Image (spheres, coloured by chain):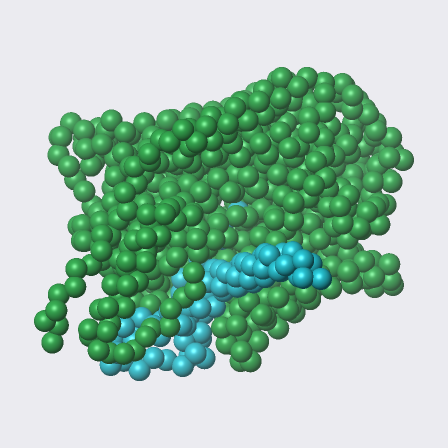
Chain colours: A green, B cyan
Amino acid sequence: MGTVELQPPPVEAEHKTRWTPPRVAVWVAIALLGGIAWSVLALGRGEHVNAVWFIFAALSSYAIAYRFYARFIVTKVLRADDKRATPAERMENGLDFTRTDRRVVYGHHFAAIAGAGPLVGPVLAAQMGYLPGTIWIIVGVIFAGAVQDLVVLFFSMRRNGRSLGQMARDEIGPLGGVAALIAVLAIMVIILAVLALVVVNSLAASPWGVFSIAMTIPIALFMGFYLRYLRPGRVSEVSLIGCALLILAIVAGGWVADSALADVFTLDKVTLVWCLIIYGFLASVLPVWMLLAPRDYLSTFMKVGTIALLALGILIAMPATTMPAFTDFAFNGKGPAFAGSMFPFVFITIACGALSGFHALISSGTTPKMVEKERQVKLIGYGGMLTESFVAIMALVAACTIDQGLYFAMNSAAGMTGGTAEGAATFVNGLGLAGVSTTPDALNQAAAAVQEQTLVSRTGGAPTLAIGISEILGAIFGGATAKAFWYHFAIMFEALFILTTVDAGTRVGRFMLQDTLGNVIPKFKDTSWKAGSIIASAVIVAGWGSILLMGVSDPLGGINTLFPLFGIANQLLAAVALAVCVTILCKTGRVRYAWVPGIPLVWDAVVTLTASWQKIFSSEPSIGYWAQHQTYKAAIAAGKTSLGAAKDPDQMEQVVRNTFVQGTLSVIFAVLIIIVLVDAIRRSVSAIRSGRVNDTEHPAEPSRVFAPSGLFATAEEKELQQRWRDYEAARSELAGTGSSPASAGS
Amino acid sequence: MNEKTGAASPGLQRAGAALRHTLRMIGWIGWYVKEVVGENDYQHYVAHLRKHHPEVEPMSRRDFERAKIDRMEADPKSRCC
């Protein structure tokens, strides 16, 4: 049949804005509010600054950047075209390529990129005052982080969802591609080690924390069996049950801590490390449905719920900061949480909230296969990252509102504080910071308030954030008596999603390794080969496990020596991603826009290579790994039995070993990235010289569907949606199939 | 009396409208959560087959969910830090 031809409605809406006076007024008001908020933050000297100014400064800056800069990138630089079909439309298979509602893809993407990074980094950076961190989180996300996520997402989408590694190989070449692949693998290992270290530091000697996090394993197993055998696919109901059980586990943790069982769950750091290593290995070889998938659901729910709760808490409690805009550590580089001056170390410590290379792995791969219309990348890529940055701002606020004396007592390594309240008070009072003083009593009381044995030297950021959260949420829900609950709630939620990252990361790393090994021994490529997967898993777990073990037993404090490596690794991965973006723009005749990813690339390369340089060549032992290495080697040769934080010859040997590994890793990272950058520049220059357009994207095919592009549909988009519904209805009537496909809500 | 009911009814109407609006919001949130966690994937899959490959018999829900989770075995989605 089909004799009657129906004309489909247009596949895109007009996206030029008409600048009516009210619209202009709204944007002027947003700009003014942002200006006032920034002035308060930048000029408030010696005064307590209310948290709402952070929120206003962030939100108004995000709004302007999203409306103007992201739009410019999407329209002019990327030339997103809604008349062109996305891979989800062209290759729709009902499985991984599925046209998905833009708001759902946004939620999906955000859940995948959000993790512990933006919660931990800003807390550590708070030692320099609130301003350096705030500026970098907001300005960094606008010009670097969100740009990277957006551009990588778009380029991957135009290439049918190719991964970052594949794009690096295709665009830059085999050498750059191989270097990028090894960099990704090495970076993955160090990231897992440092995140696991954060967990270990927050659970050590805390029976409450250990019990509740241990309970997540049976809860996840239960959820896994429920989804597999009882009610397949009913994710939301089982997640609700799981979350309820989780809350119960946190409450029960308090009972356990008060009972005779407390000793069983009081574990030292080294025992915890071995538990984590065994767990990580099992989680990576067990079937996904048992542990990994249900855990992932649980952590997604907890993550989104806690972030929403924290935002609400800050808005209601409106706490004031106790941290000044800058502390002395911003300039003298002698901070106890991490050593080094503001430039470059603030920029690598706040990794995920402002610019995170890891996101490029998610922006390429899964997300681009779900995008319905090209212009939606602005909401998903840029908007998703803005949300992540907002999480980082909230973490910074939480850290800056707690007592400064407590902050420094918690974030100084045990080598400095001696691990006792007295030692910590002496150390903190000796820091010589204006307005910072504490007493052993105050520190003991703070620990008792959250029912922990001690808070001294609980480095890693997570316990500090948990204190901040417990104060903010305790002020609103439940008062002082609930503080212990909120503290352990926060610890548990951070530990939960760090462990989810460790599970998933080990598995992803295992596949990458199998793929790489497969080039030499083809049998490794077969992922169903059991022995192969066990060997590869063991290698990855041994990789992060050994660094983790090194970190927990480091006399100098694992976080303060390893966190910079984590930051450098993550930022170097961003350099790979941005280099791929610049190369693509140069190869496709858009050199005049290469500055869009180019400026963040140059900044990022300068920051990370400077940091690497200092970590490798600095003669200051607290900063340079090799300087530290030589100092201790010389001391041992001279027959000394203790030096600085190392109290005996064994510990001194340990410092020598650790600094060797850390120094070597720094060199490897720096060399790999220089290879990628040089190769990218070579390709870009030759592409510009030849003047030819060399495009590797999938040829354009016309789109035959419509969907709004922004978060909220405009009036015109709503009208178009209606016309499409009418058209679809008329067409199915003509076809006479009579079957009405089950349509989703909205 | 009359005046009173006359005054109450717009109020009641407003309350009814607010209630309907709230219910719609709750429904939307429920739909949204299910979409994000992938609970509706099976319905989308069946709809896709009906529309594009009506000759293919769709898998059962149990088999579909099993296949979906087993695909993660070979392609675990990375989670960020």
- Indicate left or right for A426 with A220 as reference: right
Q: Quadrant of the C terminus of chain A?
A: bottom left
Task: Give the side of residue A42 with respect to residue B31, left or right.
Answer: right
Q: Give the image location of residue A154, x and y in percent.
A: 32, 45
Looking at the figure, which quarter contains the N terminus of chain A?
Answer: bottom left
**Can residue A460 be seen in the rendering of this structure?**
no
Q: Quadrant of residue A737?
A: bottom left
Q: Is residue A306 toward the left or the right of residue A732 in the image? A: right
- Position of residue A362 relative to residue B32, above or below, is above
Name the spot of residue A625 as percent of width and height, x first: 56, 30
Which quadrant of the structure image shows residue A251? bottom right
Residue at 39% x, 57% y is A101
The correct choice, above or below, for A58 with respect to B39 in the image is: above
Residue B19: % across, % down: 59, 61
Residue farthest to the front, as pictured? B2
> Observer-nearest residue: A102 or A692?
A102
- What residue lies at 84% left-to-right and 50% top-to-bottom? A481
Up/down of A192 relative to A148, above or below: below
